[in-house]
Amino acid sequence: MALPNKNKYSVLLPTYNERENLPLIIWLLVKSFTESKHDYEIIIIDDGSPDGTLEVAKQLEKIYGKDKIVLRPREKKLGLGTAYIHGIKHATGNFIIIMDADLSHHPKFIPEFIKKQQERDYDVVSGTRYAGSGGVYGWDFKRKLISRGANYLTQILLRPGATDLTGSFRLYKKPILQRLIEACVSKGYVFQMEMIVRARQFNYSIGEVPITFVDRVYGESKLGGNEIIGFAKGLLMLFATT
């Protein structure tokens, strides 16, 4: 039983066609939190996946319990930002962890995020692929070039004071995340970048933890030509408005 004043971590896990990946990522999350002895809940926000992701989530709820697996599905894809807003409404933790459900983010780094946050009471802790022991595995040269190029451009234009703006594996104080989402106007691939830019704009403290990013095991990558064009437009918008 958790003490009343003990920190609790709510993991927001947006899903779309993650039937194969969901059981493993949930198992890894439960394992990580159990071994590190941190109080937690996992909020699954499925956006009407046609592959049966929600049915798998319901089975996981039976296995691990409704106190640990919280299902908050939506009828259709409505965007990452609104998924977070939806999830926060149901989160009972005072810290929020956002991550991908496709196994590209390993839960083993979460205890390091928590440790880093506690070092200086950071408002945000962001996983970085581009500092220290961080890295990317499973990508071809083209995708690595796109990611590196995108990150390089953001550093030149926005000078955010963070080494990885396009990643989506982070820990936030709950009120901080709520304010940042309200301030953001971007959608899609550029949304995560704007979150860090706004955090710097509001003078929130940001810590970083090196992570290894692994390309998805099952399913198809959601990064395509439209996302790249959207990223470029969003980057120019942020450069003009911040």
Image (cartoon, rainbow, N blue to C red):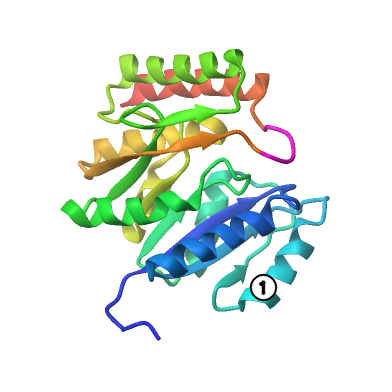
Q: Nearer the viewer, residue 187 or 107?
A: 107
The span picked out in magenta is 217-221
Q: Residue 62, position in %: x, y?
A: 70, 77
Q: Amino acid at mark 1?
A: Glu
Would you call the spot at circle 1 few (<14 residues within 10 Å), some (14-19), or many (20 or more)? some
Quarter of the image for the C terminus: give it.
top left
Q: Magenta stretch: residue 140 in it?
A: no
Residue at 73 percent across and 70 percent down: it is 58
**Could you say where residue 48 lies in the image, as x and y percent from the top left?**
76, 54
User: Which residue is painted at 52% across and 46% down in the image?
Assistant: 81
Q: Which quarter of the figure has residue 218?
A: top right
Instruction: State whether residue 51 is above or below residue 10.
Output: above
| Quadrant (top left, top right, bottom left, bottom right) of the N terminus | bottom left
**x%, y% of residue 141?**
58, 13
Label 1: which residue?
61
- The residue lying at 50 percent from left, 56 percent from top is 85
The overriding secondary structure of the stretch rendered in magenta is loop
Residue 36 vs residue 99, the one in the foreground: 36
